[in-house]
Image (spheres, rainbow, N blue to C red):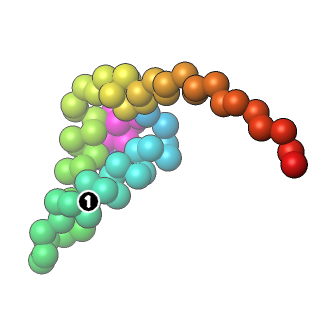
């Protein structure tokens, strides 16, 4: 069932917004003309739920911002 696929995808460590965005991108990239849209969505959810993803890849650590010199207002 699709709800099981959604819960498996969420268990990979992403939030609902990320999952929706990734499913939309996956469906857009893999949908075949003439195919059922529902099957393509299920395939994308299946992929997200079964492939382990590294949190460091999903959410790379931001670099420390460089110190900016403050300029006085004219």
Residue found farthest to the right: 74
* Vertical side of 32 occupied by 48: above or below: above
Q: Residues within 10 Å of mark 1 (few under 14, many from 20)?
A: many
* Vertical side of 1 occupied by 41: above or below: below
Does the magenta run of residues contain 52? no
Q: Position of residue 50 (x, y in %)?
A: 22, 32
Give the residue displayed 26% in from the left and 63% down from the top: 28
Q: Is residue 33 left or right of residue 56?
A: left
Task: Name the secondary structure under disc 1.
Answer: helix
Give the residue displayed 18% in from the left and 65% down from the top: 31
Give the residue displayed 24% in from the left and 67% down from the top: 37
Q: Is residue 8 left or right of residue 37?
A: right
Residue found farthest to the front: 74
Residue 7 falls in image quadrant: top left
Q: Which residues are magenta?
A: 5-12
Q: Position of residue 74 (x, y in %)?
A: 87, 49
Q: Position of residue 12 (x, y in %)?
A: 36, 28
Residue 4 seen from this side: no
Q: Which residue is mark 1?
A: 27
Q: How many marks?
A: 1
Dominant SS in magenta: helix
- Residue in the foreground of this view, choosing between 54 and 23: 54
Residue found farthest to the bottom: 34
Residue 50 seen from this side: yes
* Vertical side of 70 occupied by 43: above or below: below
- Residue in the foreground of this view, choosing between 17 and 73: 73
Give the residue displayed 49% in from the left and 43% down from the top: 16
- Residue in the foreground of this view, choosing between 65 and 59: 65
Does the magenta run of residues contain 7? yes
């Amino acid at each position: 069932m699709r709800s099981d696929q959604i819960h498996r995808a969420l268990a990979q460590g992403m939030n609902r917004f990320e999952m929706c965005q990734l499913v939309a991108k996956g469906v857009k990239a893999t949908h075949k003309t003439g195919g059922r849209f529902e099957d393509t969505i299920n395939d994308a959810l299946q992929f997200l739920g079964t492939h382990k993803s590294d949190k460091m890849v999903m959410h790379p650590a931001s670099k420390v911002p460089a110190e900016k010199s403050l300029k006085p207002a004219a």
